[in-house]
């Protein structure tokens, strides 16, 4: 009689330990799936930031080009290209006499009046800047050349 009871306890113990093993495997699989989803979301957010940034830069280039051919009041060299736009880019914080790049919040635009440069700091390390520029800070500056002051373009650099 005792032997039968002992086997019954051992079988229950094996079933219980197998159940715990199954729970552990399920927990590991769910964790791996969660990490994969989070990684993909991060990639998609970076891609959205890249597209938004490219759209804003293209709008500013178009505004500068329109100013160059005389459709609008031409800006002065080093002036704020955002002033040429009807709608400001998302995250535009304004202008200041001097802007410290380290103090610019990720995902925001600032115009440095002293340098005549529009700054954008990316939110994500992997956000692709236009022309595949390295770095996390985009610098845009209106440059005017030529004797007739008609060659106007937006210079893009990164830090």
Image (cartoon, grey):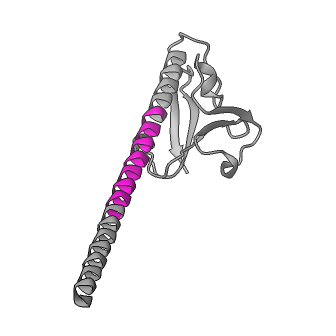
Q: Is residue 153 above or below residue 124?
A: above
Q: Residue at x 57, y 22 (%)?
A: 149
Residue 93 visible within the image:
yes
- Comparing 152 with 28, the one in front is 28
Q: Position of residue 35 (x, y in %)?
A: 39, 56
- Lateral position of residue 65 relative to residue 30, left or right: right
Q: Residue at x 52, y 36 (%)?
A: 155
Q: Is residue 30 magenta?
A: yes
Residue range highlighted in magenta = 28-52
- Comparing 153 with 121, the one in front is 121
Residue 117 visible within the image:
no
- Lateral position of residue 11 relative to residue 86, left or right: left
Quadrant of residue 128 within the rendered picture: top left
Q: Position of residue 79 (x, y in %)?
A: 66, 28
Q: Position of residue 64 (x, y in %)?
A: 53, 22
Q: Position of residue 43 (x, y in %)?
A: 39, 47
Residue most toward the front?
Answer: 1
Q: Residue at x 24, y 78 (%)?
A: 11
């Amino acid at each position: 009689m005792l032997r039968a009871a002992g086997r019954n306890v051992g079988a229950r113990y094996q079933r219980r330990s197998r159940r715990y093993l199954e729970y552990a495997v399920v927990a590991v699989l769910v964790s791996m799936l969660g990490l994969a989803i989070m990684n993909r979301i991060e990639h998609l957010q970076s891609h959205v930031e890249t597209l938004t940034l490219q759209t804003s830069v293209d709008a500013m280039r178009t505004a500068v080009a329109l100013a160059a051919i005389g459709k609008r009041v031409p800006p002065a060299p080093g002036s704020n290209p955002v002033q040429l736009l009807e709608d400001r880019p998302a995250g535009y914080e304004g202008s200041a006499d001097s802007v410290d790049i380290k103090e610019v919040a990720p995902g925001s635009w600032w115009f440095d009046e002293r340098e005549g440069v529009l700054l954008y700091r990316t939110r994500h390390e992997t956000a692709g800047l236009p022309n595949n520029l390295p770095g996390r800070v985009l610098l845009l500056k209106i440059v005017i050349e030529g004797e007739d002051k008609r060659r106007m373009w937006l210079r893009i650099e990164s830090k």
